[in-house]
Amino acid sequence: MSDAAAERLRNIDSCAVSDALDALGLKGTVKGIGAISAGRRIAGRAQTVKLGPPNDSVAKRHLCSAAVDAASEGDVIVIENLTTEIAAGWGGILSRAAKVKGLSGTIVDGPARDADEADEIGFPVFARSATSFTARGRIAELAWDIPIAIGGINVEPGDLVIADGSGVVFIPKASEAEVLDKAEDIAAREAAMARAVEEGKPVSQVMGGDYESMLKS
């Protein structure tokens, strides 16, 4: 099924989306998560996973595998992995499975591993850090397709997310129409400014009052 909102998001960058959230008084921009493989823009619906300490009540399945199997083409696997700063919440076989399913990429609030493998197959992984430490005996999947928190931002299954070289930004599902409208307007204005600079207009004029008032109008 075509997702018009996700397609619109793929034609913007994270900065325009972050600016739109600012203009609308909404939160969604995350700091400190960057690409560890195939550093290109990704965007889509969040398929969420929450990781935590292993215990006897946790289902004995490989973390994130159920979410990958259930995700739709274009989705982004988004993982809360806050239990340990060393153990990976995502790895190479998962990257391969996600690529085969046509998923856009993976975002981990925490470490991920097999960065070289993901890079070789062209699958984008964004994480707090790269690691070699396995999840075995250190973390386990508590649940998937539930609300999670990424960088202090509440993320619901199905929320839109974009990640690129500048950062990671989530859009609350209830506000996606107005955020996308505002982000597209900002992106169009910035494109016009870029053309003006390339045509030789002094940047001090291009980035004058119009730039400062961009988020208010």
Image (tube, rainbow, N blue to C red):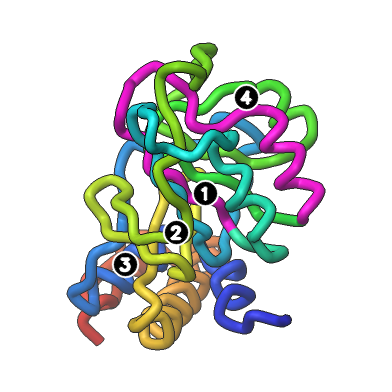
Q: Position of residue 192 (x, y in %)?
A: 50, 75
Residue drawn at point x = 72 percent, y = 24 percent? 117
Q: Position of residue 110 (x, y in %)?
A: 38, 32
Residue 95 drawn in magenta: yes
Q: Which residues are magenta?
A: 76-101
Foreground mark, 4 or 2, reads 4
Would you say residue 193 is visible in this rendering? no
Mark 4 or mark 2, earlier in chain:
2
Instruction: Specify few, some or many for label 3: CA neighbours under 10 Å numbering under 14, 14-19, or 20 or more.
Output: many
Mark 2 or mark 3, earlier in chain:
2
- Between the C-alphas of marks 3 and 1, the distance is 15 Å
> Badge 3 is on which residue?
19
- Quadrant for the C terminus, please: bottom left
Foreground mark, 1 or 4, reads 4
Question: As rendered, which of 32 and 201 lies closer to the eye?
Answer: 32
Would you say residue 132 is visible in this rendering? yes
Instruction: Indicate the quadrant where residue 201 lies.
Output: bottom left
> Badge 1 is on which residue?
164
Which three-letter amino acid code belongs to the residue tagged 3?
Answer: Asp
Mark 3 or mark 1, earlier in chain:
3
> Badge 4 is on which residue?
115
Q: Are marks 1 and 2 in contact (CB under 8 Å)?
A: yes
Q: Is residue 160 left or right of residue 204?
A: right
> Badge 2 is on which residue?
14
